[in-house]
Amino acid sequence: MLLRHQTLGYGAEPVLTGVSFALAPGERVALMGRSGAGKTTLLGALHAALLAEGARVALVPQEHGLVPQLCVTRNALMGRLDDHGAFYNLTNLVRPRAADRAGVGEILEVLGLAGLAHRTVEGLSGGQKQRVALARAFWRGGDVLLGDEPVSALDERQGAEILGQIAARFDRAVLALHDVEQALGFATRIVGLKGGRVVIDAAPAAVERARIEALYA
């Protein structure tokens, strides 16, 4: 159990109360609820708990966390910064090693970014920046991917393709998603947040569409 009857929030201000959360092998969880319901807070708590257990976690934050002045390839390479020492990282960012360039290049191809590998991030569109953040997470790899609205800036086709890539590349995933159809197509488990609590935690087939829509009422 990653979280057990926990109150989550910022300082003395609770956002979610009574939260218990486990994540079994093979699970793909869609976090759903209105803006401000606590999805980002829950993802942060799960990130900390997974790291404490020694899991390798790939993270796609809502604000992307990219370095605007660096190119797409170098931003993606940052997914493995903590695998190496400072000297390796510095020299690899100045002149990326051939094997790393090739590995990142394959990921950029999958994400439709191959032609932008040498472009600085500051000149990209919102959807392109989102895919760079995904490239960084894919390059990192690991046991679990946590994503805060990781496909919100993409069209329906792109979003579906990338959700498929996440399912194929990571054994477990927890994503905050705002699109109901995408969530139902991706998830093996729906977790709905409302009123500071988890009010849904079930397989998609066991959740009536009306209950999901009520999260946003």
Image: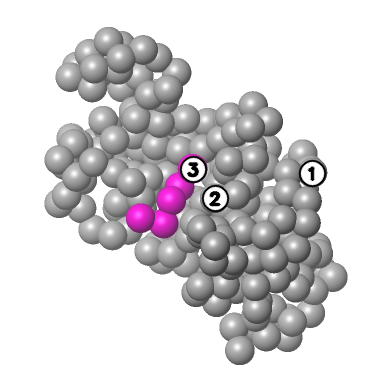
Name the amino acid type tagged 2. Answer: Gly
Write the residue at 40% across / 39% down.
Answer: 135
Kind of residue indicated by mark 3:
Leu
Q: Secondary structure at mark 3?
A: strand
Q: Total label count?
A: 3
What residue do we see at 37% from left, 45% from top?
Answer: 133
Q: Are marks 1 and 3 in contact (CB under 8 Å)?
A: no
Q: Nearer the viewer, mark 1 or mark 3?
A: 1
Residue 194: x and y in percent read 65, 76
- Badge 2: how crowded within 10 Å, few (<14), some, or many (20+)? some
Residue 107 is marked as none
* Residue labelled with disc 1: 1
The residue nearer to you, when weighing 136 against 90, is: 90
Q: Report the span colored magenta.
A: 59-63
Element assignment for label 2:
helix
Front tag of 3 and 2? 2
Left or right of 78: which side holds 164? right
Q: Which residue is located at x 32 percent, y 58 percent?
A: 127
Specify which label sits upstream in the sequence, 3 or 2. 2
Please provide percent x and percent y for residue 130.
36, 53
Main secondary structure of the magenta stretch: loop
Q: Is residue 185 above or below residue 60?
A: below
Instruction: Give the amino acid type for the residue marked by disc 1 in the picture.
Output: Met
CA gap, disc 1 and disc 2: 16 Å
N-terminal-most mark, 1 or 3:
1
Task: Quarter of the image for the C terminus: give it.
Answer: bottom right
Which numbered disc covers residue 59?
3
**Residue 205 versus residue 49 in the image, above or below:** below
> Where does label 2 land, which residue?
44
Give residue 210's position: percent from left, percent from top.
Answer: 73, 86
